[in-house]
Image (cartoon, rainbow, N blue to C red):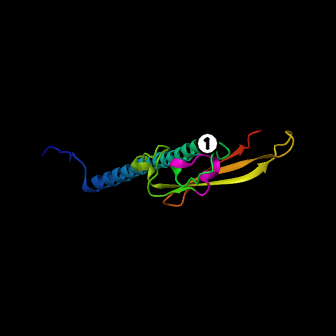
């Protein structure tokens, strides 16, 4: 009588290997999608922060200027602007620069900036009559059409 031999299986079959490979691919794709989504959110946040930084920098530059024109010269370039109203219809496209004319880094050059300055008045309830002044609006737009806007009312100084 011959001894009974068990047929002991060692290793994986081809079907089991294929199933394990498919499961591994699905898991890797899911993790990759999650990482990609996180990267896109980080890019969007940085993009938005740059746009707001550009708007705030230009707004700060504008509101530091006097309300009224200190001289009657015809200011036609940003370097010669000497009052709020000089910035009306100012725009930058292509090369965005700071107050000293120095270009921002390349990551900021995907934006355009535009300014409007409109005379008007505002009434604050409980504070009496309307206050005359100018509303300064700085808009920053990227190449995809996304836009960020800052607006500030500057009251006319009392004489």
Measured along the vertical axis of the image, is residue 115 above or below residue 3? below
Q: Is residue 32 left or right of residue 51?
A: left
Q: Residue at x 43, y 45 (%)?
A: 102
Q: Residue at x 44, y 53 (%)?
A: 109
Spot occupied by residue 90 in the image (x, y as percentages of width and height) = 56, 56
- Magenta segment: does it hold 87? yes
Is 90 on the left or on the right of 133, as rendered?
Answer: left
Q: Secondary structure at mark 1?
A: loop
Query: Looking at the image, which residue is at 86% across and 44% down?
Result: 129
Please tell me which residue lies in front, 42 or 75: 75
Percent of width and height locating residue 9: 22, 47
> 138 or 69: which is nearer to us?
69
Residue 12 visible, this orientation: yes
* Mark 1 crowdedness (10 Å alpha carbons): few <14, some 14-19, many ≥20: some
Q: Is residue 67 left or right of residue 55?
A: right
Residue lying farthest front? 72
The residue segment tinted magenta is 79-89
116 w.r.t. 156: above or below:
below
Report whether residue 51 is seen: no
Question: Which residue has dot 1 on it?
Answer: 65
Classify 158 as above or below 19.
above
Give percent across and percent down for residue 147. Answer: 57, 55
């Amino acid at each position: 009588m011959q001894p009974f031999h068990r047929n002991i299986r060692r290793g994986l079959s081809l079907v089991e290997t294929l199933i394990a490979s498919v499961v591994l691919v699905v898991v890797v794709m899911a993790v990759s999608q999650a990482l990609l989504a996180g990267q896109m959110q980080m890019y969007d946040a940085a993009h938005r922060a740059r746009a707001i930084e550009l708007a705030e920098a230009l707004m700060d530059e504008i509101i530091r200027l006097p309300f009224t024109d200190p001289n009657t010269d015809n200011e036609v370039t940003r370097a010669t602007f000497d009052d709020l109203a000089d910035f009306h219809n100012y725009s930058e496209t292509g090369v965005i620069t700071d107050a000293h004319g120095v270009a921002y880094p390349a990551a900021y050059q995907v934006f355009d900036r535009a300014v409007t300055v409109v005379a008007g008045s505002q009434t604050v309830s409980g504070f009496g009559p309307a206050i005359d002044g100018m509303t300064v609006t700085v808009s920053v737009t990227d190449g995809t059409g996304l836009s960020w806007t800052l607006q500030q009312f500057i009251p006319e100084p009392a004489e």
